[in-house]
Amino acid sequence: MLAGFETGWVESHMNNLNCGDSDSLGVFQQRPSQGWGTPQQIMNVTYAANKFFDVGEVEDRNCASCTAGQIAQRVQRSAHPERYDAAEAKARALLAEARRGGFDDIGVYRPAEARFYLKGGEIVHLGNPHYEPLMGDWNGDGVDTPGVFRRDQRTFFLKNTNTSGDADGAYALGNSTDIPVAGDWDGNGTTGIGVFRPSTGTFYLKNRFEHSGNAEITAVFGTAGDIPIAGDWDGNGTETIGVYRPSTRTFYLRNANSTGGSNGQFTFGNPGDVPITGDWNGDGYDTIGVYRPANGYFYLKNANSSGGAANLTVHYGSPGDRPISGRWR
């Protein structure tokens, strides 16, 4: 599958092209003159994909040590074989998106019960009431699952299934005063962990799931009192940092995981609201929203813009719940 997504991205950026080099056509730029089928057949995406995988599965069995890009090359026989492996991060993000479905769901974490209530999904117990909740696709299987951050141990406890029970992994990062955040920081289809340090306005982010506790990315953005958020604000497949400033009800979004200024500032919500972000309409862009603990309502926008009414207003949860979002169905 990864080889297929690498090939589709490299050859056509996932467009069903009716032209190409020589007589190449379609998503995979297959050539009728090379026996891939008639032009009409190749322009049928289902036919073209099946033809790719018919050959790709054989090549995968014949070369157990091959990378996905090498499998793609054995199928395509391109003059530029290096391009497929170079597209791995983007291909993983596309594959994860395809497996997840089109848009994010909402849910809540109920601290008194240490339970995640996933709208349209499961009720999952994880951790203790004083842990901080988060959701992410920790293993790249296309399904977002719960995690918690235990401040006193400076440790994330993550589950790979939406079932109650012990965590599947524990990973150290940050200090006891840090606020947890999660995002796909490198666009590889797997959610990484991170923390925001209010005292210095600094994000510490990591994609590796190992126990060193050292961040791979450090970025100064925001200030004391801000709440960290993350999302794919520009639709490029990589999630980047942001903050919500409760004192002014303003979202500050940045399109890179690096130190610098905001690429957009948007005011939304009421005093006391809690920020929430997600792709609410399946257009490939994460946008802002708020959860109102006083009445248990989500107010979600389909564009990152200031003011105006919410595009979606959904009641879910109870007063005092913590908002979460993700793709769990």
Image: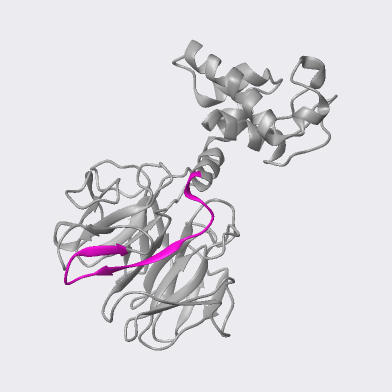
Q: Of 247 and 62, which appears nearest the observer?
A: 62
> Which residue is found at the position 59% from the left and 20% from the top?
54
Asked whether 141 or 156 is in front, the reply is 141
Q: Is residue 41 above or below residue 131?
A: above
Colouring: one colour
Residue 110 located left or right of residue 12:
left
Q: Is residue 23 left or right of residue 61?
A: right
In this rendering, position of residue 162 left or right of residue 80:
left
One can see residue 96 in this view: yes
Residue 104, magenta (yes or no): yes
* Residue 172: x %, y % from top left: 22, 50
Q: Which residues are magenta?
A: 99-117
Residue 96 x %, y %: 48, 44
Q: Give the quadrant of residue 90.
A: top right
For image coordinates 67% across by 41% down, the residue present is 14
> Is 115 or 67 nearer to us in this picture?
115
Judging depth in this view, the residue of 103 and 239 nearest the camera is 103
The stretch drawn in magenta includes residue 242: no
Q: Is residue 193 left or right of residue 86?
A: left
In this view, 274 is above or below 218: below
Where residue 205 sits in the image (x, y, percent)? 37, 53
Residue located farthest toward the bottom when viewing the structure as drawn: 271
Q: Image height check: is 178 above or below 170? A: below
